[in-house]
């Protein structure tokens, strides 16, 4: 079993208070067994890619956050609550200076660096090229099939393709 100091240090690192003042003003230290139960119940903390830890900003005080080495410039940030954007900005160095007029509350932070933006452009370009290739192959397929059919089969094939296209459009409309 870990020593009490290790438990206290781990709790402190996770932002858990290990002491409290009761209604009569007496200070109490959380029991080691209770602290162990609390710490063991917490999930393993996944490392943040751009930040070392959650950001806490004190109302009315200037605040800045240093970024991890993994972030590449420029880094765009957005503070959101649900679908609403509360504040947004961009930094070209390893520091985000938070807005001083940020309303009190709990928010989510969205970060996008240059690497992710570049990856999105690559993915979008690849998707477009794949759609173009698919269209070309499909058109060639139809031309070859039509070339081998007689006139009555061509009419039936055109009808079948129209029905298939209609079903495809209906399925896309459901999504």
Image (spheres, rainbow, N blue to C red):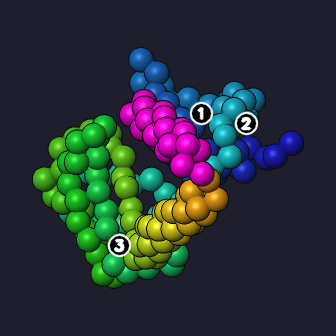
> Which structural element holds mark 2?
helix
User: In this figure, which residue is indicated by the disc labeled 3?
Assistant: 75
Task: Give how far across and how far down residue 131 sits, in percent.
Answer: 48, 63
> Dot 1: within a 10 Å radius of its alpha carbon, few (fewer than 14), some, or many (20 or more) residues?
few
| Residue ranking furthest to the left | 101
Q: Main secondary structure of the magenta part?
A: helix
Label 3: few (<14), some or many (≥20) within 10 Å? many
Marker disc for residue 122: none
Alpha carbon distance from label 1 to label 3 = 42 Å
What crowding class fits label 2: few (fewer than 14 Cα within 10 Å), some (14-19), or many (20 or more)?
Answer: few
In the image, 108: left or right of 30? Answer: left
Dividing the picture into quadrants, the one containing residue 157 is top right
Looking at this rendering, what residue extends furthest in the top direction? 23
Measuring from the top left, give residue 159's x and y in whole percent: 49, 38
Query: What residue occupies the far right of the structure in this picture?
Result: 1
Q: Secondary structure at mark 3?
A: strand
Q: Quadrant of the C terminus?
A: top left
Q: Which residue is mark 1?
A: 29
Tell me which segment is drawn in magenta: 150-175
Residue 25 versus residue 19: which sits nearer the camera?
Answer: 19
- Residue drawn at x 27%, y 40% is 83
Task: Choose between 43 and 139: the one closer to the eye.
Answer: 139
Whole-Å distance between the Cαs marked 3 and 2? Answer: 35 Å
Q: Which label's residue is closer to the chain start, 2 or 1? A: 1
Q: Is mark 3 in CB contact (under 8 Å) with mark 2?
A: no
* Magenta run includes residue 115: no
Decide which of tag 1 and tag 3 comes sooner along the chain: 1
Q: Residue at x 57, y 57 (%)?
A: 146
Residue named by callout 2? 40
Q: Are marks 2 and 1 in contact (CB under 8 Å)?
A: no
Percent x, y of residue 56: 36, 51
């Amino acid at each position: 079993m870990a020593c009490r100091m290790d438990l206290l240090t781990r709790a402190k690192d996770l932002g858990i208070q290990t002491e409290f003042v009761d209604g009569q003003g007496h200070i109490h230290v959380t029991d080691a067994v209770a602290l162990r139960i609390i710490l063991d119940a917490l999930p393993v903390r996944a490392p943040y890619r751009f930040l070392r830890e959650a950001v806490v900003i004190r109302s009315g005080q200037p605040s800045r956050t240093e970024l991890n080495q993994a972030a590449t410039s420029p880094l765009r940030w957005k503070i959101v609550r649900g679908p609403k954007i509360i504040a947004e900005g961009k930094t070209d160095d390893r520091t985000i200076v938070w807005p001083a007029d940020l309303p009190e509350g709990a928010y989510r932070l969205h970060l996008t660096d240059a690497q992710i933006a570049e990856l999105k452009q690559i993915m979008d370009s690849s998707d477009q090229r794949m759609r173009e290739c698919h269209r070309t192959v499909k058109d060639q397929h139809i031309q070859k099939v039509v070339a081998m059919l007689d006139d009555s089969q061509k009419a039936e094939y055109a009808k079948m393709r129209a029905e298939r296209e209609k079903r495809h459009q209906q399925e896309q409309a459901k999504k």
